[in-house]
Amino acid sequence: MKKYRVGILGATGTVGQRFIQLLEGHPQFEVTALAASDRSAGKPYAEACAWKLNGAIPESVREIVVVPIEPPLDCDIVFSSLPSSVARETEEAFARAGYPVISNSSSYRMDEDVPLLIAEVNPDHVDLIPEQQKKRGFGKGFIVTNPNCAVVSFAPPLAAIHRKFGIESAVVTTMQAISGAGYPGVASMDIVDNVVPYIAGEEPKVETEAQKILGTLTNGAIEKADFAVSAQCFRVNVLDGHTCAVRVNLAEKATLEDIVAAMKEFPSLGLHSSPARFIDVLDEPSRPQPRLDRDSGNGMTITVGRFFPDTVFDYRFVALSHNTVRGAAGSAILNAELLIDRRMI
Amino acid sequence: MKKYRVGILGATGTVGQRFIQLLEGHPQFEVTALAASDRSAGKPYAEACAWKLNGAIPESVREIVVVPIEPPLDCDIVFSSLPSSVARETEEAFARAGYPVISNSSSYRMDEDVPLLIAEVNPDHVDLIPEQQKKRGFGKGFIVTNPNCAVVSFAPPLAAIHRKFGIESAVVTTMQAISGAGYPGVASMDIVDNVVPYIAGEEPKVETEAQKILGTLTNGAIEKADFAVSAQCFRVNVLDGHTCAVRVNLAEKATLEDIVAAMKEFPSLGLHSSPARFIDVLDEPSRPQPRLDRDSGNGMTITVGRFFPDTVFDYRFVALSHNTVRGAAGSAILNAELLIDRRMI
Amino acid sequence: MKKYRVGILGATGTVGQRFIQLLEGHPQFEVTALAASDRSAGKPYAEACAWKLNGAIPESVREIVVVPIEPPLDCDIVFSSLPSSVARETEEAFARAGYPVISNSSSYRMDEDVPLLIAEVNPDHVDLIPEQQKKRGFGKGFIVTNPNCAVVSFAPPLAAIHRKFGIESAVVTTMQAISGAGYPGVASMDIVDNVVPYIAGEEPKVETEAQKILGTLTNGAIEKADFAVSAQCFRVNVLDGHTCAVRVNLAEKATLEDIVAAMKEFPSLGLHSSPARFIDVLDEPSRPQPRLDRDSGNGMTITVGRFFPDTVFDYRFVALSHNTVRGAAGSAILNAELLIDRRMI
Amino acid sequence: MKKYRVGILGATGTVGQRFIQLLEGHPQFEVTALAASDRSAGKPYAEACAWKLNGAIPESVREIVVVPIEPPLDCDIVFSSLPSSVARETEEAFARAGYPVISNSSSYRMDEDVPLLIAEVNPDHVDLIPEQQKKRGFGKGFIVTNPNCAVVSFAPPLAAIHRKFGIESAVVTTMQAISGAGYPGVASMDIVDNVVPYIAGEEPKVETEAQKILGTLTNGAIEKADFAVSAQCFRVNVLDGHTCAVRVNLAEKATLEDIVAAMKEFPSLGLHSSPARFIDVLDEPSRPQPRLDRDSGNGMTITVGRFFPDTVFDYRFVALSHNTVRGAAGSAILNAELLIDRRMI
């Protein structure tokens, strides 16, 4: 099978490194281009990158010379982990130059004609792409996005509930890992023996993305799901894995067993990066925990637990996912697999 | 001025140590008796106790020989930090033997005739004491309690709101420090690079105590405040300081400024352990933080911040207090000062 | 190929869990017996064990009913991770009952007739076994041990030097991970924002084991290598991975390049659990680091770096290994593979 | 008593903040000038500074407008915590302009005519000042320095030994706190669940400063103490407090009791910032620990423990001090008190 040649924008950053790690040995993709800031351009990747993941830099990319972040790039597909400050302009340039852009940045997530995809939840939203290409005059290029790393933790269990019983409102309190801020990111003096009750720009993203993901595509447009989300976002002293405390009011009555069953029934996809279980319900009273559960399904499973009736809402529970795998690079790769499966690439 | 002689039940534990530290040099109290489990009894305190607080064991208590936890005790007042498993029986024995028992345990908190005191919030609840003495046949002894350490973080700001505008419901997500579990308490392998979504028995306490504290004493009985609290409780990798994410619905309309003003106006008491400000409103977007704010007012101030209108509730904010000072030993000592001031001791 | 049936003594502990994780899918071994304390015996493993490793309990052992720690056991080989307090008597009982006992405990490490093995360093010490069997009247059973988890970090690089240039003395300062103390082990209040300069019983072990490992087997007895080791051992806030600061004086002159070359030349074995590189020399000035390097070679590689001439000794360097893999279960499994290869099993 | 007016260079940094905290309420000094980089200049201190210490910014400095780092400054004495890259030129400019400069920077520490002071250890080195003023044409200004923060932990116990028995060589392995790198300093992703075996430029400083401090001032010049120090320096996951593992060879024989007695006898000074005990010998086997002991003597005491005969050296022990108090701002303030006492200011 011929492999797709992929390029990574922002290849030296925390998420860029995770892309490289997850693409190592991938049956459908081969990394052929690494683009990063001018400071890195011109150097072999192994020299340009301060690798911060467990394990060594894969041999297959060590000698690839980093190039500037602009088209053309020696690849068929572009994965972007650019900071939002530069993503908007650059990703458009790549799409306009004919590349499928699978982006982890926040820039285009809420644009009406751009799919905001969790592959298992709203795969049909890929049908927005022809609309987008026409509207923006993109030719065969396009942009799809994956959600904010905290949203990925709780949107799937909300989707499981929403499909069956509808949702009236949800309240989410997040405890987010330091890797979510990149490198150098969070100063150690800010997080050792501490909790920080503020992540710049995070709460609005967490309050708006789920409704689009759970929305319905009709006549070439997404009608957002009609419920309010309240978000309070905290940074905690954890390397990887965002934990979310969730309360939810349902549109229709359902028992606790109904809710849990809806989680367990939510199918995974049969794609290469799909975990055996998309949502894994843990029964132990002290789970999920980031250190123990973030790598479930190679970091692609959403683990949930502590389902209880709530005193103010209908139900409450805890949801967790790996923020740089399922919450970033892993979801983008799964989206690329979906796009190939749907013959969009 | 003659000092009251005080005894500490559970003197070698985490909260017992904090009692000793806070009572060092106190103008009204002098530690004269230290009671602990049979394993410690008979040894000088410095030998019996694995001291885990910053700084050395105060000289004044090093040589006090630890005695068993039973009356009589060589003191006028008893502070109890007993585990709830033994507190109920033992504290009653001391009250019955004529000692004022100021307890940090959960055993009696929800008993109808026992004050559950935050000195600044419901000082008039001390008037339950004669009722209690009569009903239980206690003579001059009695029991008063202070709340769960997480409740102390958010009940004061709720009280500020409740007094002026009433409360319909509140949703609290706690991020609690490891010292709250005592010593050895939380295993390091459970909390390093981790969050634990479960604290045994905690959520029910957090959901029920605030309504009693904010209740009204009428005709010798407390009518609880009529609102629901939802609690999800997490253990995080912080030594001291419980952080609470709070959403609240008001009974009457109020602006954000009204809410904040209510916090600032809430008076401190003029007692020895009273902080200059009872509730301190921080304006910086990233505060309060446990490492930076837990020691505010010598650990007796409640710090709050991040007041915003909420998308599901009326308002949201973050509240923090020192769990072994304001949340335990410090509150108990302040309650003793209040009882002296009110001539109950 | 027929698999050897293996039993694990102390199966519910930290090292026992690591044995199970590493044996999952092993081509030569199949776990058939799990033995643990009376409290666990009689329960299915999944119920008896508080699993603390990343990932779920392997399906293959979940339903195995835990049995008491005594022969007979339904297996061909016994891996022991018993606490040293009970290991001496119990391991002897198993050896006497005919089982090869591959032990991670310290009880027999320094016994003259018991091999203390690092498979790559002193594989010929397995030839002590017939001697041991004869002397102790063991029949076909026997005991082999692997070293203390800190010793495994620095003994291999010392061995590389010793073989070529001899060693006069070595000074080692260890920074050891919390998992080395098992579970619950180190209390979080002891290690968060802290370093503990004391690990009970550790410094003597670290000062004596290397000389036996680097000793010479002649006429059925090991002559220990003749150099002194000084050890200061610290517990640091790291989950896995022991870091050692080492200074060394050589018997013969050698250049820094000679020393480094000796490390790189040290061969790995071709056994299943052998890493591609036994000792991996890292050039970056800030390596090795436990979080980044402990999993090198699936946790079986010793990583070293920061080789410099020293102002007091000849040379200094830093060495690191994964304390529950290379420092415990992984080394024991590799030793079993070696014993099979040498036809001792 | 008239207070000296003091200015702080680098006032917004980690050590600058510690200067301000320690000078609050000081009987001899009053902060009147705060100098920082151009980015901060012109703003009130409370606005310019990202305060990272426990507790609030002292009221007395909140409104002081930060000025550029150049003379003249509205003060009598200058405390400098400038980064070494700019310290050399700037501190000379201040000395030349007539200010006593008490510096925490490394720039001048090893200059022959500049005292490198630990007030209790080598107070007579202040007699270098007239020499320095003459040689450099400084008028009444001058520069004195305090040592590297790790050196301050182990130089005092070495001094205690050196005075009585002489030292032949010493080997030091440091475990240093993150606050030593300033703010933002160490990235959290580098230190959570980790140890970093490298601190840029640190090992040479640690290997050379002690010999000057323990040197003898004769005929206007310091003759350095004649022994070698070996240093391996590590960053560990601790907020404040540098821990040092020390081995030492003595010039003359001494018993362990002699060594410990020498520590206990080492006198403190009677100055305002002097701790009750300069060197405090702890007997518990697991002390000193940074979290428990760094604040001993308000952060000005050196705590030591774990004295043992060593297998390679004569003796070994562990030493600890607070790196931003005794290791930086506190030592500088004590040096200023000494200079006043010696009538150099």
Image (tube, coloured by chain):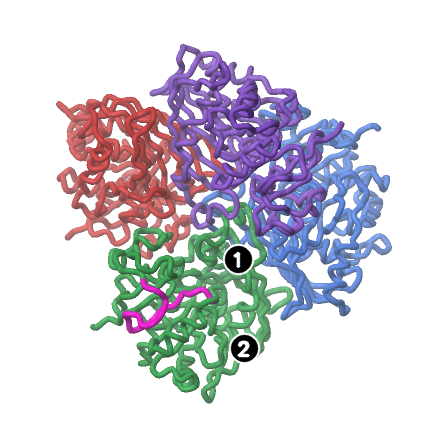
Chain colours: A red, B purple, C green, D blue
Percent across and percent down for residue B166 are 43, 14
Q: Amino acid at mark 2?
A: Gly
Percent across and percent down for residue D197 are 52, 55
User: Quick one: B21 or D175, which is closer to the camera?
Assistant: B21
Chain of the residue that carries numbered disc 2 in the rendered image: C
Alpha-carbon span between mark 1 and mark 2:
26 Å
Mark linked to residue C166? 2
Upstream in sequence: badge 1 or badge 2: 2
* Residue depicted at x 41% and y 41%: B195
Mark 1 or mark 2, whichever is nearer to me = 1
Percent across and percent down for residue C240 are 44, 55
* Residue depicted at x 35% and y 62%: C19
Mark linked to residue C175? 1
Q: Amino acid at mark 1?
A: Met
User: Quick one: C195 or C166, which is closer to the camera?
Assistant: C195
Q: Quadrant of residue B202?
A: top left
